Image: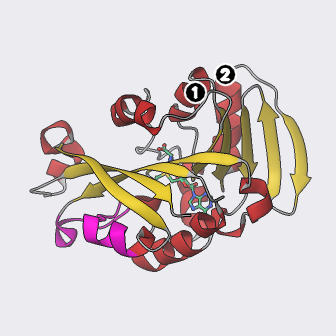
Amino acid sequence: MQPEFWHERWRGNRIGFHRDAPLPLLVSHWPSLGLPPGSRVCVPLCGKSLDMVWLAAQGHRVLGIELSRTAIEQFFAERGLLPTITTSPAGTHYAADAWELVQGDAFEIPAALLSDCAAVHDRAALIALPADMRATYATTLWTRLPGDCRALLVTLEYPETEKAGPPFPVGEAEVRTRFGEDWTVRLLERRDILANEPSFQGEGVSDLHTAVYRLDRKA
Ligand SMILES: C[S@@+](CC[C@H](N)C(=O)[O-])C[C@H]1O[C@@H](n2cnc3c(N)ncnc32)[C@H](O)[C@@H]1O
């Protein structure tokens, strides 16, 4: 999954991963993180997700990280906002209201930019990446998050021989292997969603679950 793969998806508007409403699992599980309003939330590989709108409505400031300038421009245009644009070694920063979206590579984001992030929301970020890139993602961005950080991580599980990713299946054992050393990992919910996902059924997937984890950075 090289950058060109994603740029091509955005150019061609082939963004089937984008949802026209906040993720229900975010809405139901986010309050359990107990974050104070005003906390900054990192949304890696953010696309133009409406989850960022929902997080802002909860009183959070949002730091999104996204390769595609198209995605970022569409996010602000769809809210009728003209962002302020600045640059840093991390990339190009677009900021308006509660949102700062950085056009850059999530693997290259420096710890200084993440230092005041109290939480992470990962939906379709880890599972967007093939195994070798998931390893890099876990050992770069996630290791640079500050000491008291918490996270919601949403995954998909299906038999990997039944469909080519993305999205890729990531089971509980992999989540614990990738994050368990630095994070306390708790499975919050695992839900059968095959009946709601005709495109997976159409590709021959016989079993499909989504799982939500809470991660707490170990001291
Ligand atoms: C499957 S989409 C999910 C987008 C969003 N999380 C959502 O739920 O709609 C993955 C997104 O990650 C972006 N992306 C892929 N690799 C990236 C990287 N290394 N750094 C930043 N963004 C990346 C892609 O451009 C794409 O918008």
Q: Is residue 71 visible?
A: yes
State which quadrant residue 40 falls in. top right
**Residue found at the very far bottom of the displayed protein:** 132
Residue at 72% x, 43% y: name it: 101
Residue marked by disc 2: 79
Which of marks 1 and 2 precedes in the sequence?
1
Q: Amino acid at mark 1?
A: Val
Q: How far apart in space, not on screen, are marks 2 and 1 (Cα)?
A: 9 Å
Residue 149 higher or lower than 32, as above or below: below
Direction from residue 104 to residue 178 in the image, left or right = left
Residue at 56% x, 30% y: name it: 55
Residue marked by disc 1: 53
**Measured from the top left, where is residue 115 in percent x and y?**
74, 55
Mark 2 or mark 1, whichever is nearer to me: 1
Q: Which residues are magenta?
A: 159-177
Residue 191 higher or lower than 162, as above or below: above
Q: Neighbour class for label 2 at 10 Å: few (<14), some, many (≥20)? A: few
State which quadrant residue 191 falls in. top left
Q: Secondary structure at mark 1?
A: helix
Q: Is residue 130 visible?
A: no
Q: In the rendered structure, does residue 170 fall within the stretch colored magenta? A: yes
**Measured from the top left, where is residue 114 in percent x and y?**
71, 55
Viewer-proximal residue among 57 and 208? 57
Contact between labelled residues 1 and 2, with CB atoms less than 8 Å apart: yes
Viewer-proximal residue among 30 and 1? 30
Q: In the rendered structure, does residue 85 fall within the stretch colored magenta? A: no
**Residue found at the very far front of the displayed protein:** 219
Direction from residue 6 to residue 198 in the image, left or right = left
Q: Secondary structure at mark 2?
A: loop
Viewer-proximal residue among 31 and 78? 31
